[in-house]
Image (spheres, grey):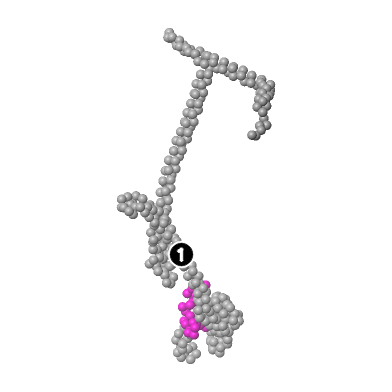
Amino acid sequence: MALNPFKESNLIDLRRTIKDYFKDHLGWLSLIIKEKWKQFLTKGRERITVMFIPHTEKKIVNFHISIFTISIIAGILIITVTITSIMIINHSSTIKEVSQLKKYGSNSKIKVKVYKEEINKLYSIFQTFKPEITHLYSLIPDTNIDTLWAKGGVPNPNPDMDKGNSGAGENSPPLEILSMQEIKDELKTTKEILEKIKGFIKYRKQIIENTPSIWPVDGYIISRYGNRSSPYNFRQEFHRGIDIEAFPSTEIRSTAHGNVQEIKWDPALGLTISIKHKYGFVTTYSHLQRVSVENGQKVSKGEVIGYVGKTGKTTKYICYYQVRIGTEFVDPMPYLNRISK
């Protein structure tokens, strides 16, 4: 059996000691509280006589009421008035909020109407824009225009409506939603088309840059490609290029990117430059007065390679310009001013 370190007599003494301590030090406070409470009860029990004296000869009415009762009635009245005031304020605030919501609702209807009109305008504009996109797309080789604007349809917003025909149109999406979905799909298609067109143009630009397509010299043509009467013996001969007459020392430019293949002196053609380009093109410039490039040099489209002269077998200051694809000479005319740099 465990031993209790506190004996019952000790606990009783402890309680008595504590009680005596509070009685000695706080007894005065207890007396004051008791006295005040007694005064409060005495004051509250006091009665007040209320009299109603009529201006006529009727009997005077009077009754007695305690201060406690008056205080309770006054408290109830104050609480009632406070609660009523709060409810009136809340009601006024609610009415104000409802009126604002109605106002916002009317504004929202106007905005929705404007949005619908703008969506319809956007749809109409895009429909007029589609033929231009289609035309650009048709310029790309190996394209199928028939399936360009194929539509997959808008997902059914209420699959359960497929089970019956009743009310099928009630939950169908608005026309504007369908228009926006269609515009979204067609914009996605347009983006893909523009990416293809961009790639095609980039590829064509590379071809253009490496295809003879500008005038080699500022002048005018005095002899074209093909059969002609020789200016020297008046016999029929095949002219493999064109003669462009110009002022002496006029700049002669490369008609495409390439590398200088050969610089030579020919008894008939005089000082001649041959430039090799991509895709099998070779251009030749003859009767030059002097050159400004070297064998094997890389030249850009439009870069000056020489100057107009009267060397070789010629009586005028000309640039004899030839275009060859592989080993075959072709008419340079289709390559002049067709596509600028």
Q: For this rendering, which residue is in front, 66 or 142?
A: 66
Q: Position of residue 205 (x, y in %)?
A: 50, 72
Examine the rendering and report whether any part of residue 251 can be seen: no
Residue 320 is a magenta residue: yes
Q: Is residue 241 magenta?
A: no
| Residue occupying image coordinates x 43% and y 67% | 136
When the figure is inspected, residue 339 is found, relative to residue 115, above or below; the finding is below
Q: Is residue 141 left or right of residue 40?
A: left
Q: Is residue 216 above or below residue 138?
A: below
Identity of the residue furthest to the left in this view? 165
206 to the left or right of 152: right
The N terminus lies in quadrant: top right
Residue 269 at x, y percent in the picture: 54, 87
User: Picture coordinates of residue 151 (x, y %)?
Assistant: 39, 61
Residue 181 falls left or right of residue 245:
left
- Looking at the image, which is closer to me, 251 or 137? 137
Q: Residue at x 33, y 52 (%)?
A: 168
Q: Is residue 57 above or below residue 126?
A: above
Residue 305, quarter of the rendered image: bottom right
Q: Position of residue 13 (x, y in %)?
A: 67, 25
- Give the magenta range: 319-341
Q: Amino acid at mark 1?
A: Glu
Question: Tag count in the figure?
Answer: 1
Q: Which residue is mark 1?
A: 192
Element on which disc 1 rests: helix
Which image quarter: residue 132?
bottom left
